[in-house]
Image (cartoon, rainbow, N blue to C red):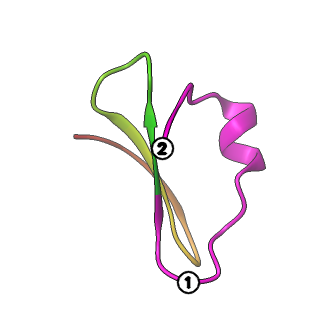
Amino acid sequence: MKVKLTKKLIDSVDYTAKGTEIYMDDVLTGFALRVGKLSKLLYIT
């Protein structure tokens, strides 16, 4: 899913019940947030 990654968005995203979800930043190419059951990770692809 492409979104503008902001602190507010990252804080508001809930952990997943199963599997992972990936949020790609629509402004900074390659910057993403991966959300799992226990963690939220920011990374550059």
At 66% across and 68% down in the image, what residue appears? 15
Residue 8 locus on image (x, y percent): 75, 33
Q: Is residue 5 magenta?
A: yes
Residue 10 locus on image (x, y percent): 65, 43
**Which stretch is magenta?**
1-21
Q: Amino acid at mark 1?
A: Lys
At 48% across and 43% down in the image, what residue appears? 1
> Most extreme residue toward the bottom, as rendered?
18
At 58% across and 78% down in the image, what residue appears? 37
Q: Could you say whether the residue bearing mark 2 is in a helix, strand or loop?
A: loop
> Most extreme residue toward the front, as rendered?
1
Task: Tell me which label, 2 or 1, sits earlier in the chain.
Answer: 2
Circle count: 2
10 Å neighbourhood of mark 2: few (<14), some, or many (≥20)? Answer: few
10 Å neighbourhood of mark 1: few (<14), some, or many (≥20)? Answer: few
Q: Amino acid at mark 2?
A: Met
Between the residue at mark 2 and the residue at mark 1, the CA separation in whole angstroms equals 17 Å
In the rendered image, the quadrant that contains the C terminus is: top left
Q: Is residue 3 magenta?
A: yes
In this rendered view, identify the residue nearer to me: 13 or 39. 13
Q: Is residue 10 left or right of residue 26?
A: right
Q: Identify the residue position indicated by label 2 in the image.
A: 1
> Most extreme residue toward the left, as rendered?
45
Q: Could you say whether the residue bearing mark 1 is in a helix, strand or loop?
A: loop
Residue 36 locus on image (x, y percent): 52, 71
- The dot on residue 7 is none
Q: Is residue 24 left or right of residue 9?
A: left
At 37% across and 19% down in the image, what residue appears? 28
Q: Identify the residue position indicated by label 1 in the image.
A: 18
Q: Is residue 31 left or right of residue 2?
A: left
